[in-house]
Image: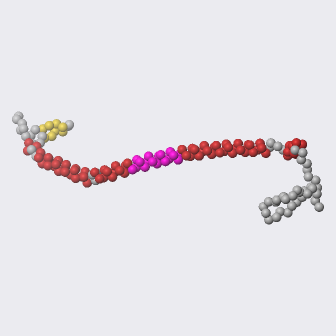
Amino acid sequence: MARNPREMYYIDGSTVRKVKPDRERVQRPARRKRSRTYEKAAVTAESSLGFDMGYMLVLSVMLIVMIVSCVVMLSVQGNVEHKERNIESLQRELESVQADNDAYEDSLNNMYSLDDIYKIATGELGMVYSKNGQIIHYEKEDGDYVKQYSDVPKTVD
């Protein structure tokens, strides 16, 4: 049995297919034309996407601006947090100083009682209570202060 070379078969999986005749294989230039057309279409499609030099320049500038603004924002946020911590520490220090001041004021107020002051005034300084008729009242004139031109009289007339 002689086989016709034009009717050759090959096995692809579970199917048997005919090999294409030589005439169909010769049509490669048409396929090359298609691939060139495809290449032209691909170049046209790529250029129509807008990824030219100007677009890439604007895109890169915008990316740089965004990165710089993020860095500036983070540094400002860090400065704000640092100042907040500083404010908190100063507030704690102020509260401590106010507590110390209140404690000193209380100790000064409680240092001497009225009895202690009376004993020191009468015993050490020789002071006495005033008696009736020893207090002399002066009328204040329009001025802010009173000038004493002579000694205060010992008795009231």
Q: Is residue 120 above or below residue 50?
A: above
Count of labels in the image: 0
Coordinates of residue 19 in the picture (x, y in percent): 12, 40
Place residue 135 in its image quadrant. bottom right
Coordinates of residue 128 in the picture (x, y in percent): 91, 48
Specify the quadrant that holds the C terminus.
bottom right
Q: Residue at x 82, y 43 (%)?
A: 112
Q: Residue at x 35, y 50 (%)?
A: 61
Q: Residue at x 24, y 52 (%)?
A: 47
Q: Nearer the viewer, residue 11 or 84?
A: 84
Q: Residue at x 85, y 59 (%)?
A: 149
Q: Residue furthest top?
A: 1
Colour theme: secondary structure
Question: Magenta region: which residues?
Answer: 65-81
Residue 61 relative to residue 127: left or right: left
Instruction: Characterize the magenta stretch by its predominant secondary structure.
Output: helix
Q: Nearer the viewer, residue 87 or 74?
A: 87
Q: Residue furthest bottom?
A: 142
Coordinates of residue 105 in the picture (x, y in percent): 75, 45
Evaluate whether residue 119 shows in this view.
Answer: no
Residue 49 relative to residue 81: left or right: left
Place residue 24 in its image quadrant. top left
Coordinates of residue 26 in the picture (x, y in percent): 9, 44
Residue 143 relative to residue 121: left or right: left
Q: Is residue 3 above or below residue 54?
A: above
Evaluate whether residue 7 shows in this view.
Answer: yes
Place residue 21 in its image quadrant. top left
Q: Does the magenta run of residues contain 103?
A: no
Q: Nearer the viewer, residue 147 or 34?
A: 147
Q: Does the magenta run of residues contain 67?
A: yes
